[in-house]
Amino acid sequence: MHMIGNDGRSADRLGHDVRMRWRRRLGKAAVAATVAVAAAHLAGGAGRTTVAAPAVLPAHEPAGAAGDRLLIEPDDGIAPIDRLLAAPRRSLDLEIYELSDPTAESILAADAGRGVRVRVVLDRHLEGARNAAAAAYLRSSGVLLAWAGPAFFASHEKAFVVDDAVAVVMSLNLVSTDYATTRDAAVVDRDPADVAAIETVFAADFAGRPVGTPAADDLVWSPGQSAADLVALINGAHHSIVAESEELSSPRVIDALIQAARRGVAVSLAMTDETSWHSAWTALVAAGGHVAVMYGERPLYIHAKLLAIDAGEPDGRAFVGSENFSDASLLHDRELGIVLVAPGLVDTVGRVVAADVRAGRSWP
């Protein structure tokens, strides 16, 4: 059975409803600010703009043995993602939960217009109405588009592959009005095994075929794998855990965090306020953990799904992905995340989440 929230909605619906409720509460000014940023990103143009492809992929940061690059939003801005979307010479495959960004849509259309094979999978079960305009525009522009099939409650993955060579695994949707005030993250991954695995799953999802999750030991897939992987990361912590997620309702994840706090691990969690998570927060604090709460988009809306285990230690690990800490996300949806081992990346995730913990209000 799919996880249902306390008012009858699916847990994956709650995140969007929380954001909208906070925006109504904070008034029109907060929304106007994000729209203004999106408008500036469109360089003053109305509607979709035409975007030229760069000659080469942007140079990646030297960030450890895997060569991964970590993007933190809103700090790094959406431009690096846009450059990657515009980079393909032969192919681009994108699986995304929600698409409502005129710039990104224009880039995909421009890619198709210059002969790149562009394929897109969009969620229809929960986000079909919001994705309809982008789907119609992309199809009219030569993009090959498929609605996610019924095998998953939602296709909540946010990832794309450029020229079968570079994968980008994200927590963010491509929604322009969210960028300026939302904590999110993305990993640019050049590991050939990861790229091949992501492409294998994408091809099956695009065709509506069932597929197992291919072997790639640092990828975290839903359904079927992610709950065990995330719990194993938490259970392996010796010194510290810092985490943030839009949702917290998975009994396995909640129990793992509580048990870690009870055995003396310093556990800190940053989240945006929602009554559905209050009981879990109270239990974690009672076990010795720390919960920091943000309210609406002040200073940021926590949409990222980030986990840093023993950051600053030689065996530290971090997780970045689309999986919320909910049974809906872990057991029933199509999701993708990645485990990072390069110390520089792990420490960056740790610093970002720790800063968000400091920015929030202690619970209760």
Image (tube, rainbow, N blue to C red):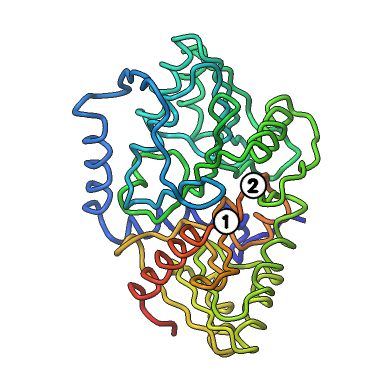
Type of amino acid at the residue the image marks with label 2: Glu
Q: Locate residue 350 relative to residue 65 in the image: left or right.
A: left
Label 2's element? Answer: strand
Q: Locate residue 118 relative to residue 55 in the image: left or right.
A: right
Q: Nearer the viewer, residue 320 or 204?
A: 320
Residue tagged 1: 340
Quarter holding the N terminus is: bottom right
What's the distance in space between the residues labelled 1 and 2, CA to CA? 17 Å
Give percent across and percent down for residue 261.
60, 85
Which label's residue is closer to the chain start, 1 or 2?
A: 2
Which residue is drawn at the image coordinates 65% and 88% (left, top)?
Answer: 263
Give percent across and percent down for residue 258.
63, 82
Instruction: Determine whether 347 is above or below 290 in the image.
Output: above
Mark 1, mark 2: which one is toward the viewer? 1
Give the number of marks. Answer: 2
Q: Nearer the viewer, residue 31 or 300?
A: 300
Quadrant of res 250: bottom right
Type of amino acid at the residue the image marks with label 1: Leu
Which residue is drawn at the image coordinates 28% and 49% (left, top)?
Answer: 31
Residue tagged 2: 335
Which residue is drawn at the image coordinates 28% and 38% (left, top)?
Answer: 38
Quarter holding the C terminus is: bottom left
Instruction: Determine whether 327 is above or below 289 in the image.
Output: above
Q: Nearer the viewer, residue 162 or 262?
A: 162
